[in-house]
Image: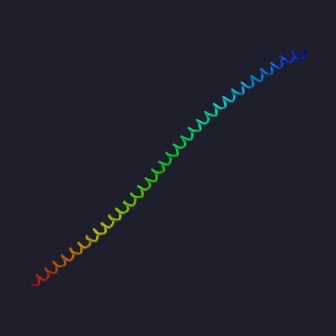
Amino acid sequence: EDIQKQLLPLQTEIENLKTSSESQFSELKSNLEEDFQKLKEHDDEITKLKTSEDERISRFTKLEDEIDKLKTSKEKRLSRVENEIEKLKTSEDERLSQFTKLEDEIKQLKTSKEKRLSRV
C-alpha cells in the first residue's frame, strides 16, 4: 500500500505527460495539415502562373512567326517590284535606243534628200 501511494503521483504525472504529449501531437498535426494546405494552395497558384506564362510565350511565339511571315511576304513583294522596275528601265532604255536610231535615220534621210535636191 505504501508503494501504491508512491506510485499514485507517478501515475498522475505519467497521465499528465501523456495528455500533454497527445495535445502537443494534435497541435503539431493540425499545424502540419494547415501548412500542407497552404503549400498546396501555393503550388496551385504557381501552376496557374506557369500555365499563364506558357500561354503568353505561345502567343508571343505565334506573333513572332506571323512577323516573320509578313517580313518574308514583304521581301518577296519588294523583290517583285524591284524586278518590275528593272524591266521597265530596260524597256525604257530599249525604246530610247530605238528612238535615237530613228532620229539618226531621219537625219540621214534628210541629208540624202538635201543631196538629191541639191543635184537637181
For the point 69% across and 30% down, the residue is 29
For the point 32% across and 67% down, the residue is 87
* Residue furthest to the left: 120
Relative to the observer, which residue lies in front, 64 or 6? 6
Question: Quick check: 69 left or right of 20?
Answer: left
Q: Is residue 14 above or below residue 112?
A: above
* Residue furthest to the right: 2
Question: Dividing the image into 4 quarters, which one contains the N terminus?
Answer: top right
Count of all numbered marks drawn on residues in the image: 0
- Quarter residue 5 falls in: top right
Relative to the observer, which residue lies in front, 88 or 99? 88
Q: Is residue 22 above or below residue 48?
A: above
Question: Quick check: 20 left or right of 11?
Answer: left
Q: Is residue 1 above or below residue 120?
A: above
**What percent of the width, then of the height, locates residue 13?**
80, 19
Question: Dividing the image into 4 quarters, which one contains the C terminus?
Answer: bottom left
For the point 33% across and 65% down, the residue is 84
Question: Quick check: 7 left or right of 111?
Answer: right
Question: Quick check: 80 left or right of 47?
Answer: left
**What percent of the width, then of the height, locates residue 47?**
56, 41
**What percent of the width, then of the height, locates residue 98?**
25, 73
Q: How is the image coloured?
A: rainbow
For the point 13% across and 83% down, the residue is 116
* Residue furthest to the front: 1
Q: Is residue 78 above or below residue 113?
A: above
